[in-house]
């Protein structure tokens, strides 16, 4: 076994949360190890184009200026293009096992693993040309490629707007942007909603900017509409848009539009695998599948020495992720006994800004909820798990045969047993099974694993997983 | 507390063993009710592999039960209302050197004397049977009767058949305790109220010790944890169930720390399952990558090509272990009306149908096809007079 590399603070995830944590910790004199699966830093929101020129591409060149220092910082060791497949407590701290076969020992860990998109299946979602908004955006940012020429962007949540605006700017025709939720009268009067929205004028302005860019190109913006099917011979050719009934139980109007691509996503689900491996306390998300890491005011988790920041603690957007990263990096440095070095902005002001960002996110979350009746658009033959081609009829049969939770359904249908291990289908399956079995989301559980957070060659396991 | 009469027999546990018991008892004419706090196969039956083996049994009573069960699985394969992927793919027990081969041959001879089909393979035959095995192995014993199935589908199929035969399923209901009724039968308290029946079958797998305690008895069943690595799907890389010759030694090794032995097999969807570990750690489910490392190292010794194959996930389960490695099947010696069908450790899938056949015969008072004596729960009861002797 190769001897482990030793650092004070290990940061998992190189998005805004992870980069901010690494900067804060190195600023306080820590040796930092920063790991990300992608070969360049940035995470989702600051994703950089990867030119595939082999080694040698500067992993920070395309980042906002405040992060570029990470590339040349002697206190930061970057492990890029390498995933943490397991993390565990060992004497004196933590051990991260990487898919490259390396292992990193650290006194403290910052989890900044972000989130994955929530996909709700619909007939035709397995056709080429059907994808998530994030995938379309990653193609654009990571490879400079347009996902398609005529695109429908649909689903729910504020993320649809930047994706649609980005596609329009890059030359695609956006046929429609369909937001499934409808702004119901009275929702603005709910506690916190108005205050949350007005707490962040900058964010409202950002949203307004995307909207006006779309309106200038006469992109139809539909509220209360969803993509309920798409079809085509060997790829998406037509997309069905439906005006949803209350709670999404069916629809009263529909129209088929011509498009070669549809990007559909319903928000995000925190990536919890490593948090679970480290035993961090988690909380369910109201009305949404998956759970989030519970953190204190300094981003500490219930496991001493483990801190969490960004979307893994709940979906509050990139600005909040960065502020949380800053706090987590500081707290991790403090945990390993480093307090000197460069002073940053005072903690109290960081917390105030963070509180504003979070109340904005909470308000947005109240505006859009997934309607319990969404499964109305599934047909018997619709694959719910693409890896194993498990159909909706099979899932219903499994629940009819007595399966009452996700693991039970997986055992009877193979849903979630394929390559993605339920990362794609698990959250939607949780919503569907909870509906079918008449149980709460927490009761039906999830498919997230604890021991292997990322596919890893057996040779690497054999080589690096010694006795704990 | 008398409890309304719910059924002739209440089966606690809807794992493979409970599901088989429910079907056998219903078909024997009893009115059956199955209670499980989770769903079908909510326990170990969803957390193991699905092998129906004769190869791993020492020549003795468990092998007799296994041979009977193997035949019953074939019958079930042709009559359950659901395809549960039963396949006689055959087992290969491989030896690394002459010494291991001698031990493997010795066991094979004794098993053959009881009716097991087994064939010796030299290195050449072995390479033809399983081309991707390491080239330096000394040989193998080939067991064509070894089969596999998908335990969760099998459980669902058994319960559907039991349902057709009149059994009632009560899922999401926990059995908390109970007492023998004066006269005959038992009363049990559950999260859905008090139920009464002429007989109660404890098929609660690794939890059957707790269930027995709640019903006023004791049986020595302990959970023995096992972990499995699951790989990405591969087309037809491993054809048989392949395991190391020292597997049987690991089964009977009572060390509480860790007993490991490589077991590699493919599932119908092409993923490989890699086991097998045995640990007494209570119901502790904390991930233990040290165990995964050991499983991977052993599997690579058998199949070097696995080095580049990716593992996608792991799972672990708790085998219901009995102290003498024999299942516990039959009437409770202390509580009239209570029956046990448990303690199968790593063989409950294979042994479930024959276990159920024994239970149905014993409960209805007919002659069982296999001698139930060696499995009797009374073997753990203190000998008469033991208490007086201190
Ligand atoms: C596909 C996608 C696109 C998005 N685009 C936008 C956008 O344009 N605008 C916007 O405001 N928000 C966007 N979001 C939301 C976005 O996630 C947040 O706003 C912000 O990026 C969150 O920052 P983060 O640091 O928490 O996570 P992320 O930026 O998601 O960073 C997490 C990082 O962790 C890495 N990682 C995860 N697990 C491991 C592991 N086991 N080993 C190694 N590395 C690991 C990932 O590779 C990733 O780089 C997007 C989200 C997704 C999923
Ligand atoms: C890693 C591993 C690999 C294995 N491989 C094999 C193999 O290849 N071949 C083989 O034959 N065997 C194998 N086994 C063993 C086999 O899985 C078990 O012997 C078998 O599943 C036991 O079945 P069961 O019905 O007795 O128990 P379980 O399947 O555990 O069922 C017990 C049921 O009782 C319920 N229950 C418990 N307490 C209560 C209560 N108080 N009230 C109501 N319900 C309750 C539980 O919810 C559960 O559903 C393996 C086991 C493991 C862990």
Image (spheres, coloured by chain):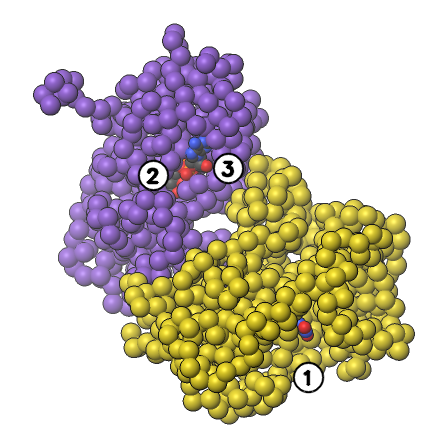
* Residue lying at the far top of the rendered structure: B183
Q: Residues within 10 Å of mark 2 (few under 14, many from 20)?
A: many
Kindly identify which residue carries mark 1. Answer: A144
Kindly identify which residue carries mark 3. Answer: B38
Of all chains, the one bearing label 3 is B
Q: Is mark 2 within 8 Å of ligand 2?
A: yes
Q: Is mark 3 within 8 Å of ligand 2?
A: yes
Secondary structure type for disc 2: strand
Which chain is in purple here?
A: B
Does residue B186 lie above or below A179 as drawn? above
Q: Residues within 10 Å of mark 1 (few under 14, many from 20)?
A: some
Residue A158: x, y in percent?
74, 66
For the residues bearing labels 2 and 3, Cβ distance under 8 angstroms = no
Does residue A60 lie above or below A25 as drawn? below
**Left or right of residue B47: residue A401:** right
Question: Looking at the image, can residue B354 be seen?
Answer: no
Quarter that holds the N terminus of chain A: bottom left
Which disc is residue A358 wearing?
none
Of all chains, the one bearing label 1 is A
Question: Looking at the image, can residue B5 be seen?
Answer: yes
Residue at point 81%, 67% (across, down): A177
The residues tagged by marks 2 and 1 sit, at their Cα atoms, a distance apart of: 56 Å
Q: Foreground mark, 2 or 3?
A: 3
Q: Quadrant of ligand 1?
A: bottom right
Residue at point 83%, 78% (across, down): A213
């Amino acid at each position: 076994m190769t001897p482990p590399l030793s650092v004070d603070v290990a940061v998992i995830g190189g998005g805004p949360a992870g980069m901010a944590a690494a900067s804060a910790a190195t600023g306080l004199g820590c040796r930092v190890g920063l790991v990300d699966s992608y070969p360049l830093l940035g995470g989702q929101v600051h994703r950089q184009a990867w030119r595939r020129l082999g080694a040698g591409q500067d992993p920070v060149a395309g980042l906002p200026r405040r992060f570029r220092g990470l590339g040349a910082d002697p206190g930061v060791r970057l492990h890029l293009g390498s995933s943490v497949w397991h993390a565990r407590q060992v004497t004196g701290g933590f051990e991260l096992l990487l898919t490259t076969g390396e292992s990193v020992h650290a006194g403290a860990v910052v989890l900044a693993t972000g989130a994955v998109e929530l996909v709700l299946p619909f007939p035709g979602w397995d056709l080429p040309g059907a994808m998530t908004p994030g995938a379309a955006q990653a193609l654009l940012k990571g490879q400079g490629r347009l996902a398609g020429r005529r695109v429908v962007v649909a689903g729910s949540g504020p993320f649809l707007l930047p994706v649609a605006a980005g596609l329009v700017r890059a030359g695609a025709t956006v046929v429609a942007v369909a937001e499934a939720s409808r702004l119901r009268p009275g929702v603005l009067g709910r506690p916190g909603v108005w205050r949350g929205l007005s707490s962040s004028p900058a964010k409202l302005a950002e949203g307004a900017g995307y909207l006006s860019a779309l309106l200038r190109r006469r992109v139809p913006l539909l509220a209360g509409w969803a993509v309920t099917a798409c079809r085509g011979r060997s790829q998406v050719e037509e997309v069905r848009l439906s005006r949803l009934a209350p709670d999404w139980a069916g629809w009263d109007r529909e129209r088929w539009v011509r498009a070669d691509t549809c990007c559909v996503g319903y928000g995000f689900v925190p990536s919890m695998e490593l948090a679970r491996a480290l035993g961090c306390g988690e909380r369910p998300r109201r009305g949404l599948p998956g759970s989030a890491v519970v953190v204190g005011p300094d981003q500490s988790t219930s496991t001493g020495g483990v801190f969490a920041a960004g979307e893994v603690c709940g979906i509050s957007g990139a600005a909040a992720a960065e502020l949380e990263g800053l706090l987590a990096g500081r707290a991790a440095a403090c945990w390993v006994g480093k307090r000197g070095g460069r002073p940053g902005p005072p903690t109290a002001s960081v917390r105030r800004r963070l509180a504003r960002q979070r109340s904005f996110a909470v308000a947005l979350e109240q505006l859009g909820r997934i309607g319990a009746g969404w499964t109305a658009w599934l047909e018997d033959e619709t694959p719910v798990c693409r890896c194993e081609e498990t159909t909706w009829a099979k899932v219903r049969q499994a629940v009819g045969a007595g399966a009452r939770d996700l693991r039970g359904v997986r055992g009877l249908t193979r849903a979630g047993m394929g390559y993605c291990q339920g990362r794609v289908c698990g959250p939607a399956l949780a919503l569907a099974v909870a509906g079918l079995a008449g149980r709460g989301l927490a009761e039906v559980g999830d498919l997230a694993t604890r021991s292997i957070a990322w596919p890893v060659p057996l040779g690497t396991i054999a080589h690096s997983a010694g006795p704990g | 507390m008398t409890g309304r009469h719910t059924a002739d027999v209440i089966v606690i546990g809807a794992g493979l063993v409970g599901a088989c018991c429910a079907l056998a008892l219903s078909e024997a004419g009893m009115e059956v009710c199955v209670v499980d706090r989770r769903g079908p196969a909510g326990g170990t039956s969803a957390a193991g592999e699905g092998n129906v083996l004769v190869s791993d049994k020492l020549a003795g009573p468990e092998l007799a039960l296994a041979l009977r069960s193997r035949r019953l699985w074939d019958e079930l394969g042709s009559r359950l209302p659901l395809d549960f992927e039963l396949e006689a793919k055959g087992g290969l027990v491989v030896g690394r050197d002459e010494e291991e081969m001698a031990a493997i041959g010795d066991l094979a001879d004794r098993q053959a004397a009881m009716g097991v089909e087994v064939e010796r393979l030299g290195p050449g035959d072995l390479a033809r049977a399983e081309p991707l095995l390491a080239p330096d192995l000394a040989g193998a014993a080939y067991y064509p009767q070894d089969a596999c199935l998908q335990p969760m589908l099998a459980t669902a199929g058994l319960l559907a058949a039991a349902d057709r035969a009149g059994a009632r399923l009560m899922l999401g209901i926990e059995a908390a305790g109970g007492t023998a009724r004066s006269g005959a039968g038992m009363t049990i308290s559950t999260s859905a109220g008090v139920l009464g029946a002429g007989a109660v079958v404890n098929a609660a797998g690794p939890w059957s010790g707790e269930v027995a305690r709640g019903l006023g008895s004791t049986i020595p069943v302990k959970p023995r944890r096992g972990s499995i690595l699951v790989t990405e799907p591969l087309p037809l890389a491993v054809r048989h169930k392949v395991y190391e010759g020292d597997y049987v030694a690991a089964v009977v090794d009572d060390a509480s720390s860790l007993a490991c032995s490589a077991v590699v097999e493919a599932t119908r969807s092409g993923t490989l399952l890699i086991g097998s570990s045995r640990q007494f750690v209570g119901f502790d489910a904390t991930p233990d990558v040290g165990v995964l490392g050991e499983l991977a190292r052993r599997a690579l010794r058998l199949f070097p090509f696995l080095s580049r194959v990716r593992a996608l996930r792991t799972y672990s389960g708790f085998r219901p272990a009995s102290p003498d490695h024999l299942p516990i099947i039959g009437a409770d010696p202390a509580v009239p009306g209570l029956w046990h069908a448990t303690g199968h450790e790593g063989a409950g899938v294979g042994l479930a149908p024959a276990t159920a056949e024994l239970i149905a015969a014993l409960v209805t008072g007919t002659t069982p096809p296999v001698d139930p004596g060696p499995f009797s729960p009374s073997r753990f009861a203190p000998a008469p007079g033991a208490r007086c002797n201190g």
